Image (spheres, grey):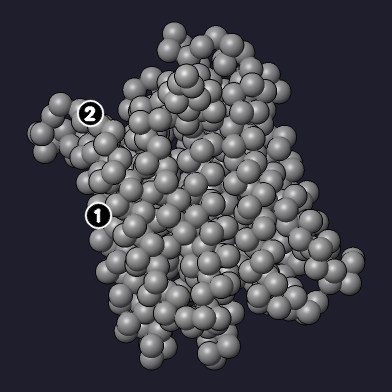
Amino acid sequence: MINPTSIFNRVGLPRSLSWGYLGVLIFMMGDGVEQGWLSPYLLVHNMSIEQSASLFTVYGITIAVSSWFSGVLAESYGPRKAMVVGLLLYIIGTVGFVGYGMGSLNYPVMLATYAVRGFGYPLFAYSFLVWITYRTPQQMLGRAVGWFWFVFTGGLNVLGAYYSSWAIERLGYQNTLWSSIFWVALGALFALVINKDHFILKSSDNSNTKTQELMKGFTIIKEEPKVLLGGIVRVINTTAQFAFPVFLPIYMAQFNISTKEWLQIWGTIFTANIVFNLIFGFIGDRLGWRNTIIWFGGIGCGITTLLLFYAPAWFGGNYWIIMMAGVLWGALLAGYVPLSALVPSLVTKDKGAAMAILNLGAGLPVFVGPAIVGLLIGSIGSEGVIWILAGLYFLSAVLTTFITLPIAKKIPIDVVQRENII
């Protein structure tokens, strides 16, 4: 008879958290329904690209704040409570944004309510990532976080993009956004109710202790500066991912790539990405987490970012060649997956605080990416912006060379040896 537990362990998926993984997949699909089309939609309705970039920038600020809090709140109050708060804020923000903002294109209301919505998914998804880091054995942690980014990206950028390309033609733009509430609620059902795994809280209800736990999200970088480097690399990781939707659909339109075709390209990019999230989870556990980030993530993404931009001009807007360039970028973007195993392994305790910095790094790109576009595209154009994004990737490869694991009893010696070889 086949042992289900051994199968789950072999592929690096914690069986006790499997329903939670499914819940994150569905939740993020609901969150990602507007990723590929909201900016072009706003431009068609007489908003400027600067206004669109500002909307995503404000959204990104709240995501960044929420991402930082997710780590320490999950550790101090439990992931379930943090995830419930994220769900409620997402629903409140969506109701306000769609019902009162988009309906009348009231820009101030859209800014405020989209910001509230931004608090939602980091508290939900990244709190679950903290749950994973505490409940997974060290030797399979790279694969376990690979599965997390598989469902996170698969929901946000793949299922969200494909679903929206279907839904906007049948339901309309606003009703597509309304439908996101159903999907996030369904995801929460799996992750919070059907998922029965228990997270053991630290045994303290003292309010001063809770405050100290929250402050560790900052003090950890003084105790272990390499955690800060990991956070910076994490920012660079997905900055382009959130910058691209602001200006690339408009750039691609110059080469006769329609919004629908762009959504299909974007969805296929992240179909490749989620597959390679798993592959690089395995590669990272074997080749070394740090080595994987440097060569596949930093160097690989820097080169393919430039390729994606220049492919339309070089090949006359050929849809399939642009698709191939995008798929290469999406696959190598997964080279950063081992960062979620590397950073918490830099410390032997307070992993939630280390994850808070990493989660902040995951949230900041939603702000940084659109901000780079909004501030610079008017002066240096699309080409200048793309070179800045590529340069950041190369910088991340350099920074990662300084993130070395300590030799500690809790970390297998073969893991340490791999991480200290370039």
At mark 2, the secondary structure is: loop
| Residue type indicated by callout 2 | Ile
* Residue at 68% in and 19% down: 421
Query: In which quarter of the view is residue 135 placed?
Result: top left
| Residue type indicated by callout 1 | Val
Q: What residue sits right under mark 1 in the picture?
A: 85
Label 2 neighbour load within 10 Å: few <14, some 14-19, many 20+: few
Q: Nearer the viewer, residue 386 or 98?
A: 98
* Residue at 33% in and 46% down: 191
* Residue 366 visible in rendering: no
Q: What residue sits right under mark 2 in the picture?
A: 200
Left/right placement of residue 72 relative to residue 321 reads left
- At which x and y percent is residue 247? 65, 72
Query: In which quarter of the view is residue 347 placed?
Result: top left
At mark 1, the secondary structure is: helix
* Residue 322 visible in rendering: yes
Whichever of callouts 1 and 2 sits on the residue coming sooner in the sequence is: 1
